[in-house]
Image (cartoon, rainbow, N blue to C red):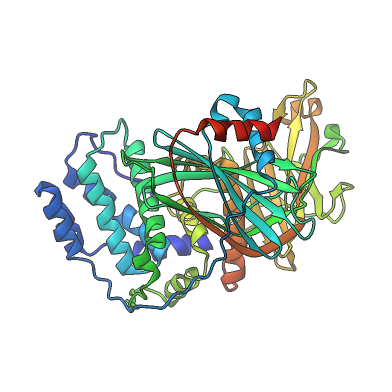
Amino acid sequence: MEQESFCANDSLESVINAYSNMVYRLAFSHTRDRCSADDIYQEVFLRYIRKRPQFETEKHRKAWLIRVTVNCCRKMWTSSWKKKIVPLDESIIFETKEETNLHYELQKLPVKYRTVIHLFYYEDLKVEEIGEILHKKPSTVRAQLTRARSKLKEILKEGYDV
Amino acid sequence: MFREEYRKMNERIFPDQEIVNKVIESINKPHREANKSIALLRKSVAIAAVIAIITLTVTPALAANVPIVYQLMYAVSPSVAQFFMPVRKSCVDNGIKMEVVSAYIHDNTAEIYITMQDITGDRIDNTIDLYDSYSINRPFDSSATCELVGFDEASKTATFLISITEWGNKKIEGDKITFSVREFISHKRMYKDIPVEVDMGSIESNPPTMEVNPGGGGGRKYREFIPDYRRTANVLVPSDSMGFQIEDFKLTGIGYIDGFLHVQASIKRNMVGDNFGYFILKDKNGKEINCVCNFDFSVKEDDDIKYTEYIFEVPPSEIEQYSLYGYYVATGLYTKGYWQVTFPLEKQDLEDDEKNTISATIN
C-alpha cells in the first residue's frame, strides 16, 4: 500500500505511526496469529529505535522495515520457543464471512509463500522490487509466485481468481 | 477476485493501540529497560509440545565426491579454495545423500558447499531445482541464498553454494547452521529459441476478444493493463490450434488489441504446477523484445488449462521486422524426502598438510 510521504528526518514516533500497519500486516500475513504478529511488530520497531537507521528516501526506509520484518518472521519459525508452543486461538473479527474464511484458508498456505503473496497482492510491489528487498533474483520471486498461486488455487474454494 | 478480498481482509488487521503506545514509549528508554517493557507485553501463552526430530547424521571418513567439489572450487577461484574448511557431514533419505562438504567464513559472510547425490538411481541431473523447499536456519540476522553451481555427470552429483551474509556486526564464527531440503524437481525439459511459424505481416488487427478475470501476472506495464481493483481484462478468444506446440504449451492466439500485440498460450496444469513457457520477439539483428505485461486466466469450461496473455509494445507498422520465438520448461521428476544437516561455522587457517591433501585430490 502507498505510504504517505514524510521527511526523512521525522521523529521515530512518526515513522512508527506511519509504518505500524504495514509491519503488523506483513507479520500477520506470515504468522497468521496475533500473538506472534505482536511479538514481531515490537521486535521490528525495537530494532528500528535501537539502530536509528538513516535513509535517503522513504522507499529505502520501507524496504528496510520489510526486510527486517521478514527476517524476524523467519527467526521466529526457527526459534526453539516457537517450535514448542501452540498459540492460543485468538479470533480476529472480520467484517464478512468471506474474509474470515479467507483468513483460515490462508493458514493452509505454506509459510514460504506467504510473504511474496502479501508483498505482491497487498503491498503492490513489483517482482523486481520484491527480489531486491528479499535478496532474491526476480526469476526466483516469479517462480515462487507461480507456485504460491498454484497452491492457492488448490486451497481456495471457487470464486477466487488468483 | 483474490486481490480485492485479500486487501479487504487485511484492512481489518492492525496492532493494538496499547502495543503501539508501548513501542513509542520505549523510544527514550535505555536499551535494556526498553527490552524489558516490551517483553512484558508478550501475550503468548504456551503449551509445551513434545517434538522429536530424529535425523540420521553421519560423518563419513572420506566422502567419495569431495574431490569433485574441490575441483569446482579451484576452477572458480584457486586463491579462495584453500580457505574452505572441510565439514563432511551428510544425511541420507529416500536414496539421496546430501553432504555439507566445506565452508569458508570471511568478514560477515559464510560460503558453504553442499552436494546432493542419488546413490540408488538417476533422479539428480543438471536441471535439479530445490523447488524453494530448502531452508537455512541460523542464529543470527542475515540474508541467505542457495544456488546450483555444478553437476558431475559421472557421479550424478549436484553441487550447491550457500552464501549467508550477517546483517549486523555479530561474529558468526562458532554458530551452528542447519540446512534442510524437503523436495526437489529434476530432469526438466527445456526448449529454447523455438521459432513460431507465424506470418507477422498478416496479424489480425481486429481479432475476436473477450473479457476475463486476470490472475497473477507481471511485466513493466502490468499496472497499466491491470490497474488496482479492475476485475477484467480484454484478451484474445482462445483458438484450438494455431500450429505451434511444445509438449503442453500451445499457441492459442495472436492479434492486435488497442495497438498492442497480444500473443496467447495455454499450458495444461500438472501435479507439481511448475511448467512454464513464454514468448519473445527478435528483430533481424537478434535483439530481443520482452512482453511489457503478461497475466494468467482461466476459462470456465476447462479448468485444467491455464491461459497466459503476453502483451508486446510493437506497433503494427513495425511488426514485420520481428520473429516470434517460444520458450518452454517442463517438469520431469518430483522427489520428496527430508534431508537435514547441522554443522558449525568454523574459521581457521588450514594446516599445511591439510592444504596438501586438498591439492592432492585435484591433481
Residue B29 seen anywhere in this rendered image of the structure: yes
Residue B253: x percent and y percent?
79, 48
Which sits in the foreground, A132 or B142?
A: B142
Question: Residue furthest toward the top?
Answer: B285
The residue drawn where x is 24% and y is 70% is B43
The residue drawn where x is 61% and y is 44% is B160
Residue A117: x percent and y percent?
50, 56
Against B2, is B195 above or below? above
Query: On the image, which quarter does residue B272 sit in?
Result: bottom right
Which sits in the foreground, A131 or B296?
A: A131
Q: In the rendered view, does B152 fall on the left or right side of B69?
A: right
Query: On the image, which quarter does residue B152 sit in?
Result: top right
Which sits in the foreground, B278 or A50?
A: A50
Q: In the rendered view, does B8 fall on the left or right side of B239?
A: left
Residue A91: x percent and y percent?
34, 77
Is the N terminus of chain B in the top left, top right, bottom left or bottom right quadrant? bottom right
How many numbered markers are drawn? 0
Against A52, is B100 above or below? below
Residue B322: x percent and y percent?
79, 28
Is the C terminus of chain B in the top left, top right, bottom left or bottom right quadrant? top right
Which sits in the foreground, A100 or B65?
A: B65
Against B16, is B203 above or below? above
The residue drawn where x is 55% and y is 40% is A137
Against B323, is B23 above or below? below
Residue B13 seen anywhere in this rendered image of the structure: no
